[in-house]
Image (cartoon, rainbow, N blue to C red):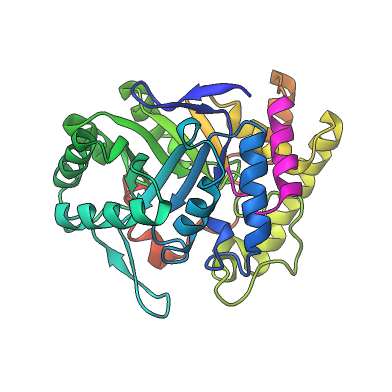
Amino acid sequence: MEQRQLGRTGPTVSALGLGCMGMSPDFYGPADEAESLATIAAAVERGITLLDTGDFYGMGHNEMLIGQALKTLPRDRLTISVKFGALRGPTGEWSGYDSRPAAIRNFVAYSLRRLGTDHIDIYRPARLDPAVPIEESIGAMARLVEEGHIRHIGLSEVGAETIRRAHAVHPISNLQIEYSLLSRGIEDEILPTCRELGIGITAYGVLSRGLISGHCTRGSGGAGRDFRAISPRFQGENLDRNLALVEALRAVASETGASVAQLAIAWVASRGDDILPLVGARRRDRLVEALGALDIRLDPAALRRIEEAMPAGAAAGARYPEAQLAHMDSERAHG
């Protein structure tokens, strides 16, 4: 599989990463643990080396799942990326973020135990903690690098100013942020800043939580604790308008012999060698489909047709509910 380096100072990994969040019954409804483990194993067998998780996914469940998978996988050939800092309650409620130095050392200790490993390859705060200067958080993480507990420092969903401040304390290998045909806000300021500083991008949400996968229908918006039940893009007229965009993209996909999902993933991968798509495949069949995107080469004519079908800014609805967007430094930065 093609390899890409995650920033000027980061590790070299497969050109596609596996996002494991959906493998915990927390964000996208029920999950099949046996199928999840089989999917992780199949991904590694096919050459994927980057596994992405968060300590708050399933409140530790996701890390334990990966820890179970690692018992039979070649740990030395894998890059494990972990987000930390989101606070949860007994019923799963959210209660803010904590990036105090003492809290970071606590979080990493628990993650190492759940994962069953002696180091985390990329460690990153899930969001900016408004109560803690980013310099203090990165300083604490730099000490963890010196001690060998983590190898590289990353960021997630922060704006250009925060990126610069963090990078001045310790080299940042990569920024994890949503980037897809429907979510292109990083192109204005965040992406240019990362390129100036030599920071890579790990792009999550490349299929907009399944919305532009080609498999989403009017009744598949989710319910209960499924994130899509509260996502603005899956609601009412917004969903209808977004699905119309998907049909336009489907017409382009049929011309290229690709599926809608493959075309959407290939578009993200085409944006630069410093951008690495994360796919949230929870089943082996979806994994196989996603891997097919790596065989697609988009020429200028195909890129033009894709952008005509799904132009920048065409999405109906925000990518997160307003209450969540208010806490995202990346959104405040570019307005």
Q: Residue at x 60, y 26 (%)?
A: 270
Quadrant in which the N terminus appears: top right
Taking the image as shown, residue 328 lies to the left or right of residue 47, namely: left
x and y, in percent, of residue 318 in the image: 51, 57
Task: Please tell me whether residue 101 is drawn above or below residue 199 in the rendered image.
Answer: below
Range drawn in magenta: 279-296
x and y, in percent, of residue 269 in the image: 59, 29
Q: Residue at x 55, y 66 (%)?
A: 227
Q: Main SS of the magenta segment?
A: helix
**Front residue of 45 and 91:** 45
Q: Residue at x 63, y 44 (%)?
A: 41
Asked if residue 156 lies in the magenta stretch, the reply is no
x and y, in percent, of residue 200 in the image: 41, 29
Taking the image as shown, residue 289 lies to the left or right of residue 195, namely: right
Task: Please tell me whether residue 5 is drawn above or below residue 216 in the rendered image.
Answer: above
x and y, in percent, of residue 85 in the image: 30, 57
**Front residue of 203 and 180:** 203
Question: Dividing the picture into quarters, in which one does residue 2 lie?
Answer: top right
Q: Residue at x 70, y 40 (%)?
A: 290
Inspect this view and state whether residue 235 appears.
yes
Residue reaching furthest to the front: 72
Count up the numbered dots. Answer: 0
Inspect this view and state whether residue 331 appears.
no
Residue reaching furthest to the bottom: 91
